[in-house]
Image (cartoon, rainbow, N blue to C red):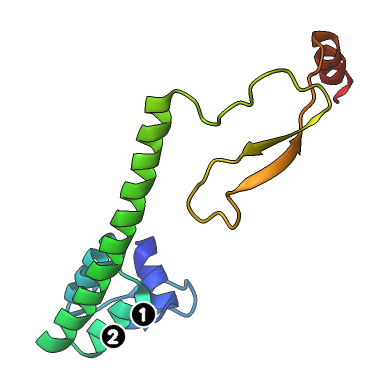
C-alpha cells in the first residue's frame, strides 16, 4: 500500500478520504481501476508526468501518442544498453581492460593511447607518468594506512 501513498504524494491518485487522526487513506472501489492502471504503467517505467497525461485524457489518440513516445524512449535505452553489452563482450574477448605500455618506465613520462569509451570528452593521446613500486614500498604503504 506504500504505492498508494506515493501516488497520492505525486498527485496521481487522490484518496476519497483521509482520516485526520490516523492519517489513513481510504479509496473508493471505483478508484481501484485507476490504481491498477497506474501500477501497470509504472511497471513499464512510465514517468509520472506521462501517467498524469493519460489519466487526464484517456482518449485513444492520446494513449497512442503517450505510449508511442514512451516506447521510443525505451528503444533508445535498449540501444544504449546493447552498446554497453557489446563493450563488455569486447573487453572479455580481448582479455584485458586497458592496453599496457611496453617496456619498463620507472618515473619516466610515456605517451600512450587511452581507451575510448562512450561519453568520454577526450579519449585520444595523453602523457602519463608511470612509476614502479618495489614490493617493500607497497607493504609499507599498506601498513601505514589507518
Asked where in the image residue 68 lies, by quadrant, the reply is bottom left
* 3D distance between C-alphas at marks 1 and 2: 6 Å
- Is residue 135 shown left or right of residue 84? right
Q: Which residue is mark 1?
A: 49
Residue at image coords 86%, 15%: 137
Position of residue 107 in the picture relative to residue 23 (left or right): right
Circle 1 crowding by C-alpha within 10 Å: few under 14, some 14–19, many from 20: few
The single residue placed furthest to the left in the displayed view is: 60
Picture coordinates of residue 106, whole percent (x, y) = 81, 21
Tell me if I can see residue 11 in this picture: yes
Q: Position of residue 85 (x, y in %)?
A: 35, 41
| Residue underneath mark 2 | 53
Q: Position of residue 72 (x, y in %)?
A: 25, 69
Q: Are marks 1 and 2 in contact (CB under 8 Å)?
A: yes
Do we see residue 15 in this rendering?
no
**x 58%, y 49%: residue:** 123
Q: Quadrant of the C terminus?
A: top right
Amino acid at each position: 500500500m506504500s504505492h498508494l501513498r506515493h501516488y497520492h504524494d505525486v498527485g496521481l491518485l487522490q484518496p476519497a478520504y483521509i482520516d485526520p487522526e490516523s492519517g489513513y487513506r481510504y479509496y473508493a472501489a471505483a478508484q481501484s481501476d485507476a490504481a491498477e492502471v497506474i501500477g501497470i504503467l509504472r511497471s513499464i517505467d512510465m514517468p509520472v508526468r506521462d501517467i498524469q497525461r493519460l489519466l487526464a485524457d484517456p482518449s485513444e489518440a492520446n494513449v497512442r501518442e503517450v505510449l508511442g513516445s514512451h516506447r521510443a524512449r525505451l528503444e533508445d535505452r535498449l540501444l544504449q544498453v546493447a552498446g554497453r553489452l557489446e563493450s563488455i563482450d569486447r573487453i572479455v574477448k580481448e582479455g584485458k581492460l586497458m592496453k599496457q605500455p611496453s617496456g619498463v618506465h620507472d618515473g619516466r613520462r610515456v605517451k600512450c593511447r587511452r581507451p575510448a569509451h562512450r561519453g568520454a570528452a577526450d579519449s585520444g593521446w595523453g602523457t602519463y607518468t608511470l612509476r614502479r613500486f618495489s614490493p617493500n614500498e607497497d607493504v609499507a604503504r599498506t601498513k601505514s594506512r589507518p
